[in-house]
Image: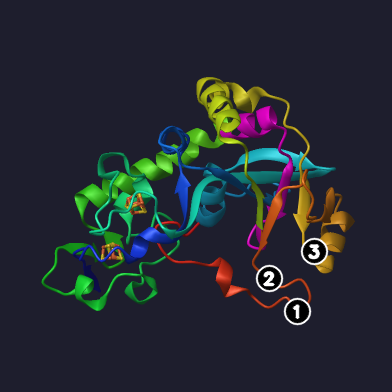
Amino acid sequence: MSIHFSCTLCGRCCHDLRLPLAIDEALVWLAHGGDVQLFCDAIVWPQEPPESDALAQHRRRRSFGAHSGTLPIRVTVTLVAAFAGACPNLRADMTCGAYDRRPRVCRIYPAEVNPFVPLDPAAKACPPEAWADSGPLLTRAGKIVDADTAALVAQSREANERDRFGKAYLCALLGYDAAALANEGFAIYAPERSRLEAALREAERSGAQADEMQPHDWRFITNRSSTLSNLRSIGATAGYAQDSDDSPGYLGFFDAETGASDQRHSPDGPGTL
Ligand code: SF4
Ligand code: SF4
């Protein structure tokens, strides 16, 4: 199946987002007055997966090794520019006011960065006319054929891999040590802008050495009692997500009582994590 695409400049994809940023992009976003948060999640990692396990290898490339109690884990930290309503860069005519410095994820949309997520036009914010067969070819048989978009996706994956040690170092610098269980939610830190900017610069400068650092101890936070008891039973440090000044925020994908998926936390747009 082939998918054609031509942007109509409707601006729908530039609202209510959580834009994932690389370290260099986060510094640019901060320099222009934006706010950046850290979304942290972690997965239990008892042993290295085989090379043939493509999904696990993908996860490995964008995470760093750590431990929680006696349990080996891998932590993924996503730098996020979050905003409700229109992006602060969106102009009244629905063009981007930061076109030359817009994040890669904006340039890639509506294509997917994650190789395990197929492009589904029905799940995108773009209107039907954007997908007309008269537009340029974007994908064929699930593969991106637009050369510029394919190059941007490759750059984005490289940045994720390159940044992972810098993010480990960043969390050590900021004293952040809480993560949600992967696929269940995110622990969210919202550092003050100048503090984050200084730490990001240091992480960018020194982060490549971070894999030689003694990994610091992480704790899981959750809103579900079953997750809490399961994690504790296998040796992890875990506690309930708490609403206090010195605790990170918690964005759960599931209701604490029923376990029902909460779709409010799965927005579409360039910011889908
Ligand atoms: S920075 Fe991205 S989300 Fe913001 S207006 Fe530009 S393209 Fe849209
Ligand atoms: S929603 Fe789609 S068609 Fe509309 S501006 Fe964004 S990329 Fe273009």
Q: CA distance from mark 2 to mark 3?
A: 11 Å
Query: Picture quarter containing residue 14?
Result: bottom left
**Which disc, if any, is residue 258?**
1
Task: Give SS at disc 1.
Answer: loop
Q: Residues within 10 Å of mark 1 (few under 14, many from 20)?
A: few
Tell me if residue 178 is in the magenta stretch.
yes
Number of labelled discs?
A: 3
- Residue at the extreme front: 92
Q: Position of residue 151 (x, y in %)?
A: 28, 45
Pointer 3 residue: 227
**Horizontal placement of 1 versus 88: left or right?**
left
What amino acid is at disc 3?
A: Thr
Magenta-tinted stretch? 167-185
Task: Give SS at disc 3.
Answer: helix
Q: Quadrant of ligand 2?
A: bottom left
Mark positioned earlier in the residue sequence (1 or 3):
3
Q: Residue at x 69, y 52 (%)?
A: 249
Q: Residue at x 62, y 29 (%)?
A: 169
